[in-house]
Structures are given as structure tokens and as C-alpha cells.
Amino acid sequence: MEQYIKPVEIRWADLDPNFHLRHSIYYDYGAYCRISFLEEHGLTSLIMARMQFGPILFREEAVFRKEIRPGDQLAIGLELIKSRRDFSRWTIRHQLTINGEILAAVITVDGAWINTRERKLATPPSEISEVFDKMPRNKEFLWLTP
């Protein structure tokens, strides 16, 4: 897949008293983008619940570059920047852009899969790996060794 980009509608509740995007909303947009990708590729929350697997984050970092304000045309992209070959550990980067060209923020998350019944990190079932394998990869994508 070349790119995955989701348009985002800025809501009044997303703003801070200075009338720009609240810092915590950036992370919400990242989660929205990741879950949208999974769901659009057939990996819904119901399926993950049935498999007793879910994503878990170890680190989430945002770098803020430009103010996002009401009325901006905002979009968020997603790309895999590194992963183990079994997709048990991974790093995803999001770029938020204004009007399709101005980089407003970069969010990077490190994550893994957890077996929700055993409450332990685990290698995901093939249904999950197949979806993750469809994720757009950064041009400098790196396979991790265990």
C-alpha cells in the first residue's frame, strides 16, 4: 500500500483556551487512524475480542511543528517504520498535515500485541499479521531482530 491517510474533522471540544488543538487530541487522532486502518482491513474490535488479542503501546511521542486551528483541513497518515517479522513488536509513525502540505505534528508509537486472556505479550495470530503486513511502510523501514 502506497499511503494511508484519514481526513480528520476538528471539533470544538478538541480546542484549548487559545483556540488551537489541545495536546492530548493529537494522541486521540493517532489512535483513531490506527484503529481505522485495522478495521478497514477487516480486523475489527469484535474480531480482536474473539481472538483475545489487542494492541498495546509502550511509548507514544508527539512532536508539534505548527499550530492546528479551527477551519484547518486536517489529515493524518500512518506508516510502519520498524517491526519484527512476526509483527509482535512494531513502531508506527503518524504525520498530521494541514491543507495537504504543511506538517503540523509527528506522532510515533512503539507497540506490541497482548493476549488479553493471559494478560501477556504474545505473537499475534496470522489474521493480525496479514493485516499489519498491508500497512504502508516508511521508505527507511527496518525489520527488527528479536
Image (spheres, grey):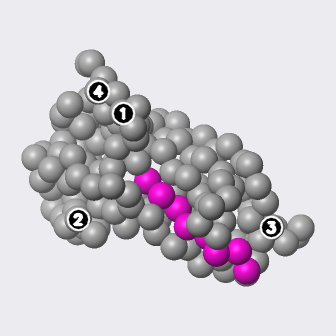
> Is 58 part of what is drawn in magenta?
no
Residue type, label 4: Trp
Label 2 neighbour load within 10 Å: few <14, some 14-19, many 20+: some
> From where the camera sits, is residue 43 visible?
yes
Mark 2–mark 3 CB contact (< 8 Å): no
In the rendered image, the residue lying farthest to the top is 145
34, above or below 108, in the image: below
Which label's residue is closer to the chain start, 3 or 1? 3
Q: Amino acid at mark 2?
A: His
Give the class, few, some or many, for how many residues have Cα within 10 Å of label 3's Cα (few <14, many ≥20).
some
Residue 120 visible in the shown view = no
Per the rendering, the mark at residue 41 is 2
The x and y percentages for residue 94 are 51, 51
Instruction: Specify which label sits upstream in the sequence, 1 or 2.
Output: 2
Reading the image, the residue beneath label 4 is 143
- 90 versus 2 height, above or below: above
Q: CA distance from mark 2 to mark 4?
A: 22 Å
Give the image location of residue 113, x and y in percent: 29, 42
Which type of secondary structure does the marked residue at label 4 adopt? strand
Q: CA distance from mark 4 to mark 1?
A: 7 Å
Q: Nearer the viewer, residue 135 or 2?
A: 2
Q: Is residue 12 above or below residue 135?
A: below
Give the magenta-colored segment's residue range: 71-78
Is the residue under label 1 in contact with that under label 4 (CB below 8 Å)? yes
Give the label on residue 20, or none: 3
User: What's the residue type where badge 1 is placed?
Assistant: Phe
Q: Quadrant of residue 142?
A: top left
